[in-house]
Image (cartoon, rainbow, N blue to C red):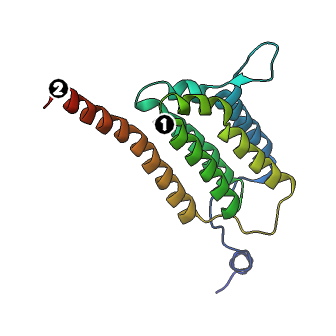
Amino acid sequence: MITRGAIASMSQPRRRFSIIEPESKAPTLKRLRQLSRLLDKAIVIPGTRVGIGLDPILGLIPIGGDFLGVMLSAYIVLESARLGVPTRTLGKMVFNIIIDSLVGAVPVLGDLFDFTWTANEHNVKLLEEHLRFPSQNQSADKWFVFAVLIGLLLVAIVLVALPVILMRLLWGALTGS
């Protein structure tokens, strides 16, 4: 026997990812703005518009700092996916994070780059643009989001492994072992 509820549930499109309900988007967006500000421009230099966030400071910590920065940035992408951001926009967000993390991993030059390139701020602006003008694009499915997060995890692992390997090679060259 088919019930009225069963017919109603068949006529509704199947959700592709756990989407945040419209009434709870404002607190989520506020939280993501705060995280972005903390990571990119937590402290504004007096008399200027230049801000220094936690992300470039974390980048100064050898080995683990860049890993932590990528993981915190990936949270913004995950929450954006839950807010229904389409795959193309999520791809732009991931590209911003990859540029930030890979160039930021270069000694000295990367640290200076980290102070100017605010990937998290760019990503929140992309999210706000989507929420302001929601397109007819379908939101990303859970497998795409899973693949993106795994990709960012791999980038973060490379950022940890590469300096360790380079230091070991340098130590071997200096000590002759």
Q: Residues within 10 Å of mark 2 (few under 14, many from 20)?
A: few
Quadrant for the C terminus in the image? top left
**Type of amino acid under label 2:** Thr
Q: What residue sits 20% from the left and 32% below the top?
A: 172
List x then y, in percent, for residue 38. 67, 27
List x then y, in percent, for residue 78. 61, 50
Judging depth in this view, the residue of 134 and 114 nearest the camera is 114
Quadrant for the N terminus in the image? bottom right
List x then y, in percent, for residue 163. 36, 35
Vertically, is 5 above or below 132? below
**Type of amino acid under label 1:** Ala
Circle nearer the N terminus (1, 2):
1
Q: Residues within 10 Å of mark 1 (few under 14, many from 20)?
A: many
Residue contact between numbered discs 1 and 2, judged by CB atoms under 8 Å: no
Query: For the residue labelled by badge 1, is the local secondary structure a helix, a strand or a loop?
Result: loop
Give the residue furthest to the right.
Answer: 133
User: On the image, which quarter does residue 160 sit in?
Assistant: top left
Q: Which residue is mark 1?
A: 105
Judging depth in this view, the residue of 68 and 136 nearest the camera is 68
Vertically, is 50 above or below 6? above
User: On the image, which quarter does residue 26 sit in?
Assistant: top right
Q: What residue sits 51% from the left and 43% below the top?
A: 102
Q: Which residue is mark 2?
A: 175
